[in-house]
Image (cartoon, rainbow, N blue to C red):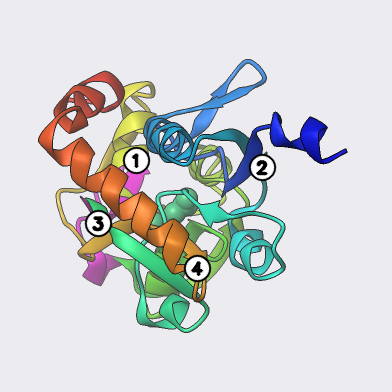
Amino acid sequence: QDQANAGEKKVIVMGTNAEFPPFEYREGDKVVGFDVEIAKKVAEKLDAELKIEDMLFDGLIPALEAGKIDFIAAGMSVTEERKKNVDFSNGYYEASQVIIVTADNETIKGPEDLKNKKIGVQLGTTGDMEAQNIEGAEVVQFNAGFAAIMDLQNGKVDAVILDSEPAKNFASQNNQIKILDVELTKEEYAIAVKKGNTELVNAINAVLEELKTSEYDRLVQKYFTA
Ligand code: GLN
């Protein structure tokens, strides 16, 4: 029994929400993206096999706390609130929230024009929190940023607040929408582990450190919209 197990690789489980290009998205039935590349390197470092669990963004922290996943790699921004429930690695990407409107929209030019408007967001994200702070706004929560953009085009919401890179990604394939040239926030993405899992967070930080000196730029070029 023991001998049989000794030959088996341990499994490490990444939790993500594969609705967030270029960090994680589906290619056929596979989840790929920038975060997956980092996760693969973490697995390699630990000599483990990587398994990916794709779930709602909103369910990631509960899944981590319940031990269903070992870490979250999901373009997750570090926030004080989340730090109460998880430990974060060092940051690996600086991001911001941006406003998306339809290409022909002439009235929403900046955050001040969002008051009393209907705003689409992805449930449980920092964009969601940002929208909740806008005076009089009706916040419509979607399970995926892409769904929010569909409803923007259908006229069901007036604007969408989303992370900058996925926004650029969607806009590059869709000339019906545009991104306003304003950054609503400054955020940093990091990988989350269960509180107290220092061994894993140290391994992740080591991988991030190695990446900075070598492959980071290549990965940015491979995955990011110019
Ligand atoms: N960066 C945002 C957050 O942490 C959105 C992440 C996502 O939708 N995957 O809330």
Q: In what element is the residue under mark 1?
A: helix
Q: Amino acid at mark 2?
A: Glu
Tell me which segment is drawn in magenta. 94-113
Q: Which residue is mark 2?
A: 53
* In the depicted structure, whether residue 61 falls above or below residue 12: below
| Quarter occupied by the C terminus | top left
Q: Name the residue at 34% across, 68% down.
A: 78
Name the residue at the front extreme.
Answer: 3
**Residue 120 visible in the picture:** yes
- Which quarter of the figure has residue 3? top right
The answer to whether the residues at label 1 and label 4 have Cβ atoms under 8 Å apart is no
Name the residue type under label 3.
Ser
Question: Going 65% across and 40% down the picture, which residue do you hit?
Answer: 11
Mark 3 → mark 2, Cα distance in angstroms: 25 Å
Q: Nearer the viewer, residue 55 or 164?
A: 55
Residue closest to the far left:
213
Q: Residues within 10 Å of mark 2 (few under 14, many from 20)?
A: some
* Magenta region includes residue 102: yes
Discs 1/4, front? 4
Q: Which residue is mark 1?
A: 167
Measured from the top left, where is residue 125 in percent x and y? 47, 63
The kind of residue tagged 4 is: Asn
